[in-house]
Image (cartoon, rainbow, N blue to C red):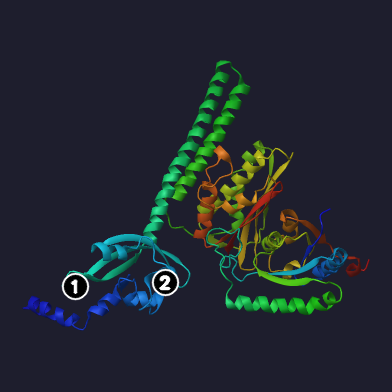
Amino acid sequence: MPETRNILICTDFSKHADTAFIHAMDQAKKYKAKLHIFHVIMPSDPCRNSNSKNSSGHGNSNEPAESENNVVQQTIGALKQKYIDRLKNNIKEYAFFVKIGTPDVEIVQYAKEKNIDVIILGALGIPEKDRATRVRTAANVSKFAPCQVIVIQMNTRDSFGI
Amino acid sequence: MGKMKKKQSKPSQFHDLTFKSVLDALPCYLTIQDADLNILFANQTFRNDFGDAVGQSCYNVFQSSEHKCRKCPVQKTFIDKKVHIAEETILLKDGSSNEMIVYSAPLVSLTGNVTAVIKMLTNVNMIKEVQKELVTLGQSFAVLTHDLKNMLEVLEGGSYVIEEGIKDNDMALTSKGWHIVRKNIHEISRVTQNILYSSKKRPPKFQKVKPNEIARRAVELFQEKAGTLEIQLISQLNPALPYTTMDVPSIIRMLSNLIWNALEACDKDKRKTSHSVFVRAEFYNNDFYMFEVEDNAHGMSESTEANLFKEFFSNKGDSGTGLGLMVVDRIVKNHKGKIEVLTKPEIGSLFRTIFKA
């Protein structure tokens, strides 16, 4: 089995992502790997903000507008606030990344660029009615990522009182 | 009398104009340079884009270089006192690269010496674009003629099989021949429609329609082909998608090209025993919707993925013109949409087009 040096945990701040985060921490500790904590913000206008390399000609990698940069910085702040305490004492090397785009495309792209060995993400994320997109993120990342993908399903016994 | 008055009013209309203000108003960059190529004068159009560069060297301002250009028309004019024309690529402050036609003309003193040279630069980006289109047109003729020739040869082969079948009263053979002919008629029809779409610029005729209805119509066109190829063609269309405005024939063409590519990719992939093509119409978010066409064929390599939307790029060898995705790209642009692609070798590909609801 190839060495695991870079682990990517994708979070949408949901309970599913929290469960996935615990598994990602375990894996990072076990392999002494760098943990990349990654969040994707859906663009207000996906057709304007074409920073994916796969987009067609009109999608020239536009630099995000200043307001978008602010949102990115704020979200990095939110990620740190949520996860940094747990990381500090457990993980030697970690980094926070936020991108604007379609989650599945951005996650796969990031995994390619950073030579990620394992992607860990929640099966469902936030409930569908509150979700910003109907893109099948977990399914598409599982299918198209260039590395191993672990999709974490939450233990629903607690919530259903089983 | 009236005419006389008009003639008299002309000089008074322009008497405020100075020679410099005329030069400033020219829609091109105009500089006057000395023998060391230092800028002695620059018009307003130049100053707007390069700032006050008087005193600086021409090559420093236009090329950000410390050295004189090898084929400098200004230097030639200083030597032979003649007008010279050249093409230069100029970098503007905003980083954009601009193709320029450069004219250099001598300013000669009473003693007959060239004291300075006028350098005038006209932006020809638009002309270059037209040139590029003409090159593309030439390429398209070559590629398409070659592909149509291939298809016609297969048609001839099919018609021969039919003739043999009829001659021998062999229905199975006749049917086989007819299958070949029909497949190629479809292919020629598809290529012709794509040529028509890409060769004439027609303004899209937007009408209100439900995206899932359009996807359903596109899928219907391919059910028979999918059945013949033993590929599952599965629609996942969200009926809750609201009415939106789109150019219906264009979107059907876009989906047709994507579905066709997916079916062809599945047909070529001999490593798997079963193939599926999914066509989806779904919300992207509250304000945008998307179409997805996903296959489980052989996927694409990184180099293929990088070249996908280049004109006449095809990875189908003789059976592909590369026109299909070019047309998809154009349709998405016309609808101010976006294309996203996910692909993995040996796994499959997903093409997603996103539009404003």
Q: Amino acid at mark 1?
A: Ser
Relative horizontal placement of residue A11, taking residue B15 as reference (left or right): right
Q: Residue at x 82, y 57 (%)?
A: A3
Nearest the eye: A134 or A88: A88
Q: Position of residue B229 (x, y in %)?
A: 66, 37
* Residue drawn at (71%, 62%) of the image: A114
Chain of the residue on which disc 2 is drawn: B
Q: CA distance from mark 1 to mark 2?
A: 27 Å
Q: Is residue A89 visible?
A: yes
Camera-nearest residue between B63 and A128: B63
Q: Disc 1 designates what residue?
A: B109
Image quadrant in which you'd find residue B120: bottom left
Look at 56% across and 47% down and name the residue there.
B257
Q: Which residue is mark 2?
A: B60
Callout 2: few (<14), some (14-19), or many (20+) C-alpha neighbours within 10 Å? some
Q: Nearer the viewer, residue A115 or A24?
A: A115
